[in-house]
Image (spheres, helix red, strand yellow):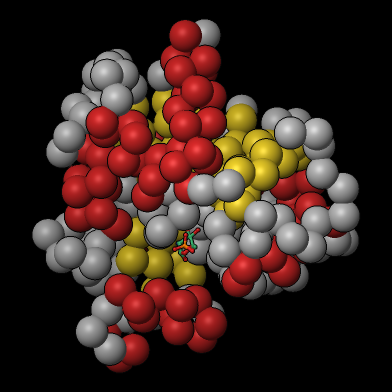
Amino acid sequence: MITVSVVKSQEEGAKLALDLLKLKLDSGANVLGLATGSSPLAFYQILRESDLDLSGLVTINLDEYVGIAPENPQSYHYYMQEELLAHKPVKASYLPDGQAADLDQAIKRYDALLEEFPRDLQILGIGRNGHIGFNEPGTPFDSRTHLVQLSPSTIEANSRFFDSLADVPTQAITMGIASIMAAKTILLFAYGKEKAQALYQMINGKVTPDVPASVLQGHPDVKVIADQAAASLLEELDAP
Ligand code: GLP
């Protein structure tokens, strides 16, 4: 089931998300799935400035580029250090190893980790083409961790973080769609009008691998936090 909260600002969205995380921690949650991109930034800010103790928490990220070192400011390893982990110590944090000599091994290890640490809460963003993690349109719903070729639209969208289009990695390791669906609760942030179409298709559209996020219609507990621009095409909204 998907519930949508429409917020006036990302700060308001971050507060809602922090409240949800607190509830989860109070009820014994100890594994948090993390996402990168611009959508969760306000949440990480409020979290690192909060007095929440995360030292008992294991974090597991959705994805990482292939061929970029953790020290590279464009890597998701670096992003997580900057935005959260360097400020808020956790018990253990994991991201896929995009630099592994044997990527198949790295992928198997990540699947084993996901089995070992079932996620209580998974943070998500949504791509403009409806991707979640780096699961591009057409990814099978039963996919686990895998290597992906990024679509031209994703490379283009992510190029804003790089010096040039040519610097954007073309491959990534991502949790699969089944891996994302295994989280007990999913919290998805969607901000800005360029997400409106993807959010509409995710919530009101047909469930199809052409729109990876549409799989979430079959998940028991999905909470969406969207601003008015991203929610502008939605057909029905829950009362605020
Ligand atoms: C990237 C990430 C996704 C993220 C998406 C949207 O492709 N791999 O996990 O959800 O971008 O990013 P943003 O939140 O910056 O719009």
Q: Nearer the viewer, residue 205 or 179?
A: 205
Say which residue appears at 72% left-offset and 46% top-offset: 216
**Is residue 176 depicted above or below 61 in this figure?**
below
* Quarter of the figure with the N terminus: top right
Say which residue appears at 33% left-offset and 66% top-offset: 65
Spot occupied by residue 121 in the image (x, y as percentages of width and height): 52, 30
Quadrant assignment, res 139:
bottom right
Left or right: where 82 falls relative to 61: left
**Is residue 178 depicted above or below 153 in this figure?**
above
Q: Is residue 44 visible?
A: yes
Q: Is residue 182 visible?
A: no
**Is residue 176 depicted above or below 91 in this figure?**
below
Say which residue appears at 41% left-offset and 58% top-offset: 38
Spot occupied by residue 42 in the image (x, y as percentages of width and height): 39, 45
Left or right: where 64 falls relative to 12: left
Q: Residue furthest left?
A: 71
Q: Residue furthest front?
A: 8
Quadrant assignment, res 180:
top right
**Is residue 18 depicted above or below 97 in this figure?**
above
Q: Nearer the viewer, residue 48 or 180?
A: 48
Q: Nearer the viewer, residue 70 or 79?
A: 79
* Quarter of the figure with the C terminus: top right
